[in-house]
Image: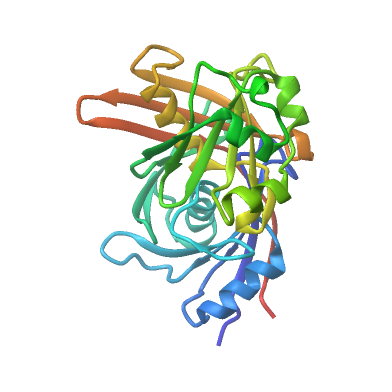
Amino acid sequence: MARQRVFVVDVFAEDKYAGNQLAVITESAPLATDTMQRIARETNFSETTFILSDHPRDGAYDVRIFTPAAELPFAGHPTLGTAFVLRNEVLTSRPDSLTLRLGIGEVPVRFVGEGDGRETVWLSAPHVELGRIHSPEDIAPLVGLSAGDLDRRFPVQDAAIGVSFTIVPVATLDAMKRARPNRSAFDREHGSGFPHFLFSCEAYSASNQINARMFAESFGVAEDPATGSANACLGAYLLQHGHGYGGGDRLDLRVEQGYEIGRPSLLFVRGVRRAAGIDVSVGGHVVPTFRGELL
């Protein structure tokens, strides 16, 4: 039996060894679920994905996503990175678009060429459900801040896109730098709880509109360098609360993440609010770094 190939790519990266690392395992159909989880724990990246077949089933490629702690029904950077590996390393053709079948369902991905020769990989995000609103006084201590550090223009609110997050608006970049997950307070107040996705309208780079951080210890990840699923939730959240860059019903953002942990990342978030609902797309660049095989 042929050994499974392994590809490591950096997603939402402007250069090698930045962005969010992803291990993609091909020809994975013979692997048991427990083995996939152990491999994800071995790589210890935010996520590891497994392409079950290089042939589409009803027009979509079956893929499973694992963090070091658990399987996920959806995640952004694994979707983009896996689609990139499928297109460039697995398939005999290089289609302009393809669809992954994940736990949440089918997720379309498209590849858009740029003038400098690079490509941006875009996913059409699944539906985002905005949920419970929290008191700033309750949530701020869980991320090492005070209620006064939060941006009162926006609510602290849960959002779900197959996985759930608590979106925490932070007033300044200085407060973003000071933020730390407070594990004892988190366990005491919320048990397993949702990961906390912090954002600020102040950024390191003048070219970017948003700075973001993700604390995801419940997923086995202390801090995530770039979180496509949470940024999709952020896009829907900002449109819902009337904060659209480029127009009240439209959103076109550059989001920086991972700066505080030495993995600078850049995500593109676009959205539109229509009568039928909110549509969000998340894009970024993918940079290959390693290839090998499972022994």
Quadrant of the image occupied by residue 249:
top left
**Up-down: is 53 above or below 15?**
below
The residue drawn where x is 51% and y is 36% is 231
Q: Point out residue 162 in the picture as x, y percentages from the top left corner.
A: 41, 52
117 and 291: which one is in front? Answer: 291
Query: Looking at the image, can residue 20 be seen?
Result: yes
Q: Point out residue 246 in the picture as x, y percentages from the top left corner.
A: 43, 12
The residue drawn where x is 43% and y is 71% is 53
**Up-down: is 252 above or below 119?**
above
**Up-down: is 254 above or below 158?**
above
Q: Point out residue 107 in the picture as x, y percentages from the top left corner.
A: 36, 50
The residue drawn where x is 77% and y is 35% is 260
Q: Is residue 264 left or right of residue 65?
A: right
Q: Point out residue 254 in the picture as x, y percentages from the top left corner.
A: 56, 24
198 and 189: which one is in front? Answer: 189
Quadrant housing the N terminus: bottom right
Q: Is residue 234 left or right of residue 294?
A: left
150 and 46: which one is in front? Answer: 150
| Color theme of the render | rainbow
Marker count (numbered):
0
Query: Looking at the image, can residue 9 be seen?
Result: no
87 and 279: which one is in front? Answer: 279
Quadrant housing the C terminus: bottom right
What is the residue that sits farthest to the left in this orientation? 275
